[in-house]
Amino acid sequence: MSEQDKIETRRTVFAPAVDIAEKENEFIIWADVPGAENQGVDLDLDGDLLRVTVKVTSPEVGELPLIYREFETGDFETSFRVSQKVDKEKIKAEIKDGVLTVTLPKAAEAVPRKIKVKAA
Amino acid sequence: MTWNLFSELFGADPWGEGPVWTSPFRGRLGERTGPYLNIHGNEEKLMVVSEIAGLDPESLEITVHGRSLTVSGARKLPELAEDECRTYNERVGGDFTRSIVLPYEVETDQVEATYERGVLVVKLPRAEKDKPRKIEVKAA
């Protein structure tokens, strides 16, 4: 088989449904990634690009044939451009029940502060 | 004759609704959105798999009655304070109910359901009394 005959196969990959919110001190990203393996979540910050890769395992069905299908299973991938306001060192992520929550705290300068006015 | 579980589930209405969907999540265009389900099975047991990220486990109710399976529950999105908002929103939250007609009766007290990592799996073994039996022909 020549090099051209080799076909690389990859699992189906989906972009997860995502919500983004801005709070006073942080941004939050929620992503629906059902079936995510516990150790299968990878967050990779490259400059200002946050790449999220999630590996998914399907439930054990063994030999049981699939007789009705509404959804396909696959890994998840998506990426976000992280704003300058974010303190990149402090980005945290956790996953629970198939929901990935990424917390991006704002850098101190970006947090709105009240400035006291001294009366002369 | 091979047994076609697909036609058992939908009878003579292959373009119909399939497993009934009531109180659905609705997407922005009013289209039905999740939770979706896949059904695996053979003549002895069924396995219903559904992806429901962030399900509230206390809200989950699974009922089996005759040949009908009903799954209902709720998925709440995190609440935000008054001055906070979602700047980008693709996920849908709310109550859902789905009912499906199974191709055979199941052993109700042997139905098992697990919810792990956002995936709900319901295992339903066929009821003993509903299993096909060979009938011996006695020679006269």
Image (tube, rainbow, N blue to C red):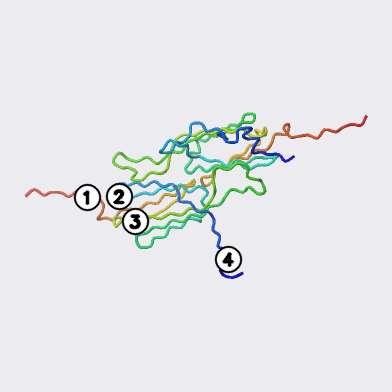
Q: Residue furthest right?
A: B140
Q: Secondary structure at mark 1?
A: loop
Q: Amino acid at mark 4?
A: Lys
Q: Position of residue B50 (x, y in %)?
A: 55, 42
Instruction: Please give the name of the residue rendered at 37% of the width and 40% of the height, measured from the top-left corner.
Output: B79
Mark 1 or mark 2, which is nearer the start of the sequence?
2
Is residue A37 something that shows in the picture?
no
Q: Secondary structure at mark 2?
A: loop
Image quarter in which the C terminus of chain B is found: top right
Q: Amino acid at mark 3?
A: Val
- Say which residue label 4 marks: A6
- Say which residue label 2 marks: A25
- Say which residue label 1 marks: A113
Tell me, yes or no, whether the two marked residues, 3 and 2, touch with CB atoms within 8 Å: no
Q: Amino acid at mark 1?
A: Arg
Frontmost of labels 4 and 2 is: 4
